[in-house]
Image (cartoon, rainbow, N blue to C red):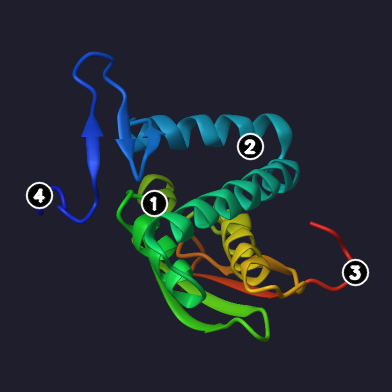
Amino acid sequence: MTKMAPELPIEVDSETGVWTSDALPMLYVPRHFFINNHVAVEKALGAETYAEILYHAGYKSAWHWCEKEAECHGLEGEAVFDHYMTRLSQRGWGKFITEAIDLEAGTCRVRLEHSAFVYQLGKVGRKVEYMFTGWFAGAMDQILAARGNSLRTVAEQTQSAAEEGCDVGYFETKPLTGAAH
């Protein structure tokens, strides 16, 4: 087991107990607690409705995070996306690997290994990491906007390690055409 990575700054206020990382307040909860809550909401709303809600919330959050981190660290372009994938990977969601990215085309492909959802739920025969999908489009769109590019994107999960015969998950982002997200 590896000890806390020094490159991931985590501070705990001894008076309030508030955890902070990258100047953002964080919550530290067991994986099963989060996933059990996620599954309960999915059951109540239906996976499709819940996925749509999470897409928009994740998109907005990714945009904001990338904007603030780019400003804070003087990052731009692909460096912002790489920084985002690194930080997501350091927070226990899984390991996010950018296999391809083309900012001019508005495309990227991200591989997900060691998914927290798959670790908790196992092989359930469907894509279970849809919570992450809006994150990729939100990050791409913030980077594009910062470059003065009006192109906007949409992301989808194309594979999950929770599906039979699959060992990893995949997410693809492409230019938005028609349907608004």
Query: Residue at 19% of width from left, 19% of height from top?
Result: 14
Q: Residues within 10 Å of mark 3 (few under 14, many from 20)?
A: few
Give the CA separation, mark 4 to mark 1.
17 Å
Q: Secondary structure beneath disc 4? A: loop
Farthest residue to the top: give it: 15
Q: Secondary structure beneath disc 2? A: helix
Q: Considering depth in this image, is 49 or 62 the residue closer to the camera?
A: 62
Q: Is residue 164 left or right of residue 5?
A: right
Among the two numbered marks 4 and 1 on one chain, the one whose residue lies closer to the N terminus:
4
Among the two numbered marks 2 and 3 on one chain, the one whose residue lies closer to the N terminus:
2
Q: Is residue 116 left or right of residue 169?
A: left
Among the two numbered marks 4 and 3 on one chain, the one whose residue lies closer to the N terminus:
4
Residue pointed to by mark 3: 178
Q: Considering depth in this image, is 47 or 51 the residue closer to the camera?
A: 51
Among the two numbered marks 1 and 2 on one chain, the one whose residue lies closer to the N terminus:
2
Between label 2 and label 3, give the one nearer the viewer: 3
**Is the C-beta separation of discs 3 and 1 under 8 Å?**
no
Give the CA separation, mark 1 to mark 2.
18 Å
Between label 4 and label 2, give the one nearer the viewer: 4
As drawn, 9 above or below 179: above
Query: Residue at 48% of width from left, 76% of height from top?
Result: 78
Residue pointed to by mark 1: 93
Between label 1 and label 2, give the one nearer the viewer: 1
Could you tell me the amino acid type at mark 3?
A: Gly
Give the CA separation, mark 2 to mark 3.
27 Å
Q: Secondary structure beneath disc 3? A: loop
The count of marks equals 4
Residue 42 bears which disc, if any? 2
Give the CA separation, mark 4 to mark 3.
47 Å
Between label 3 and label 1, give the one nearer the viewer: 3
